Amino acid sequence: MATVTFIEKDGNRKEVEAPIGLSLMEISHKHGIDIEGACGGCLACATCHVSVSPEWFEKISDIEEDEEDMLDLAFDLTKTSRLCCQILMSEELDGIVVALPGAPRDW
Ligand code: FES
């Protein structure tokens, strides 16, 4: 089983099982990570914003314009910000690390 690590606001690193094909937003909800995802993944909010660790940022799919527009509304943006409902888990992303807004980013 693939894994993803979420860095929470208090700096806690939570490594969880990540079924292939689910979005990181769906995976966060399964494991009680504090990511809201208000619109359920249809790119109508920015409450699923995360920063992706730089080494993984290159490996995720390119950002679409709609996502970029929504991201502008997010708080604590970084160069590697993404909306995690748009990141689908795959074998290639096994081990990916993302930080919640406001979390320390000590990759
Ligand atoms: S959950 Fe709303 S844009 Fe991701």
Image (tube, grey):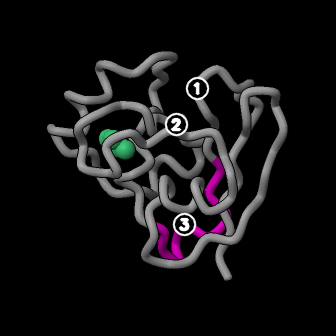
Q: Residue at x 29, y 20 (%)?
A: 72
Residue numbers of the magenta segment: 89-97
Q: The residue tagged with tag 3: helix, strand or loop?
A: helix
**Is mark 1 in CB contact (under 8 Å) with mark 2?**
yes
- Which three-letter amino acid code belongs to the residue tagged 2? Val
Q: Quadrant of residue 70?
A: top left
Q: Quadrant of residue 88?
A: bottom left
Q: Which residue is mark 3?
A: 93
Q: CA distance from mark 2 to mark 3?
A: 15 Å
Q: Residue furthest left?
A: 65
Instruction: Indicate which disc, 1 or 2, sits on the residue closer to the N terminus.
Output: 2
Q: CA distance from mark 1 to mark 3?
A: 20 Å
Residue 89 point in image, percent of width and height: 48, 68
Q: Residue at x 68, y 47 (%)?
A: 6
Instruction: Indicate which disc, 2 or 3, sits on the residue closer to the N terminus.
Output: 2
Residue 1 point in image, percent of width and height: 68, 82
**Is mark 1 in CB contact (under 8 Å) with mark 3?**
no
Residue 101, numbered circle: 1
In this view, 105 is above or below 41: above
Instruction: Indicate which disc, 1 or 3, sits on the residue closer to the N terminus.
Output: 3
Q: Which residue is mark 2?
A: 50
Q: The residue tagged with tag 1: helix, strand or loop?
A: loop
Residue 32 point in image, percent of width and height: 68, 51
Q: Quadrant of ligand 1?
A: top left
Q: Is residue 92 magenta?
A: yes
Q: Is residue 83 magenta?
A: no
